[in-house]
Amino acid sequence: MARTAAERSSRDRPEPTAADYLARARDFAPTLAAAAADIDARRELPEEIVAALVERGLFRLLQPRTLGGAELLPAEYVPIIEEIAKTDASVAWCLNQNSGCSMTAAYLAPAVAREIFGGPRGILAWGPGPGEARIAPGGYRVTATFSFGSGSHHATWLGCHAPVVEADGRPRLDDAGAPVVRTMLFPKSQTRFTDIWHTIGLRGTGSDQYEVKDLFVPEAYSVDVLSRRAGPAREEGLLYRFSSLILYASGFAGVALGIARATLSHFIDLAHDKIPRGAPSTMRNNNVTQRETALAEARLTSARRYLLGSLDDITAAVAGRGHLTLDERMTIRLASTFAIHTAVEVTDMLYQSAGATAIFNDNPFERRFRDVHSVAQQLQGRQQHFETVGQYLLGLSGDTSWL
């Protein structure tokens, strides 16, 4: 059967590259900047911003190519999240969260993956919380309450990581004696939301609470994406040798780096013109300002190169051997956590150096100060991760569940 001209044009067009997506993110910056105050005030992404992100394919960066996704590798993906975060951290946070969730498509039966992600608005969100998935004929009965559902306001499907219990209530254990936890997926229409997201920063993520009660989830809509003993992904791409947890860690590090980089850029602009009270000239002529600007540049560039360089090197190694090692997972965790805390330190230093200018809402420092500290308070920014990696380097055993 002959293809139409439109079909030929669509199929013969080369697939966008990582550079193309990065360019789309940069081109979108003016529109995003104009909406930033509204995003923060509304505590969610406005529909026009979501539609623009969908149109640019930015929710599909980690989706399989078989579903029309970009299937970018980690070091290609993180700079795009970083670029968005330079303008609006809440949007970047949602993109990273929704993108990590979308990697679930690689573990689903093709028909289920198409149902959830195949449409133009196939967006999945989830968050942590207590609950259970009780074994039932053909699937599970799920009762759970989950918070921190970043990106859930514009998502079409939600999920939850729930411990599995037998029909009689006994916990189901794996061969090693650990509780079995599976990820349950269901339409957002089957949940009830509670507005809890009144926060210092990342307000636009709309990370509210949602719950389900005795909701039946068919087996086909349940996957194991958390366990290190999970079976291989159905998709064979190199990306899916990495877990979504690794993409969360490195992606949220990209959010922090983007915030700090934008803060430095605005600080340099401020230093050109601001004459502090009692000073003889502009800030840029002050030797303390000069020193702090140089240190900020060195710290951000070092943390960024450590993260992206590690991701590049590890991806090349995984391409050769087919899997990640514990040493590589430790490296990604350390590089990601270090990048987050370096970004906080740089933002704090520049905020202080900006003086009273920084405390006003109409200047670019105040929101970035709030946002970067909210990034560091989240799981991926825990100081405990340094302890975990330190234990490993010293030959001690530690908790590796967040690697």
Image: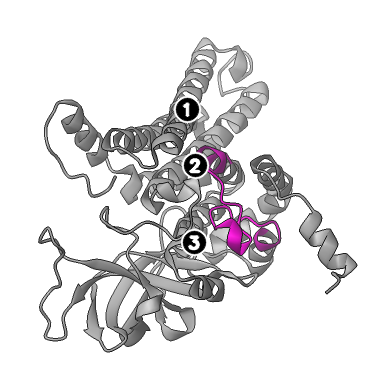
Q: Residue furthest front?
A: 1
Residue tagged 2: 74
Relative height, residue 272 to residue 200 (above, below): above
Q: In this image, 165 relative to 146: left or right? A: left
Q: Earlier in the sequence, mark 2 or mark 3?
A: 2
Image coordinates for residue 152, horizontal then vertical, percent: 48, 69
Image coordinates for residue 155, horizontal then vertical, percent: 52, 70
Would residue 129 be visible to someone looking at this image? Answer: yes
Q: Earlier in the sequence, mark 3 or mark 1?
A: 3
Residue tagged 3: 102
Would residue 363 be visible to someone looking at this image? Answer: no
Q: In this image, 31 relative to 292: left or right? A: right
Q: In this image, 403 relative to 349: left or right? A: left
Q: Give the Cα distance between marks 2 and 1.
A: 11 Å
Q: Secondary structure at mark 1?
A: helix
Residue tagged 1: 309
Whether the residues at callouts 2 and 3 have beta carbons within 8 Å, the answer is no
Image coordinates for residue 166, horizontal then vertical, percent: 16, 80
Image coordinates for residue 161, horizontal then vertical, percent: 31, 67
Q: Secondary structure at mark 3?
A: helix
Q: Residues within 10 Å of mark 1 (few under 14, many from 20)?
A: some
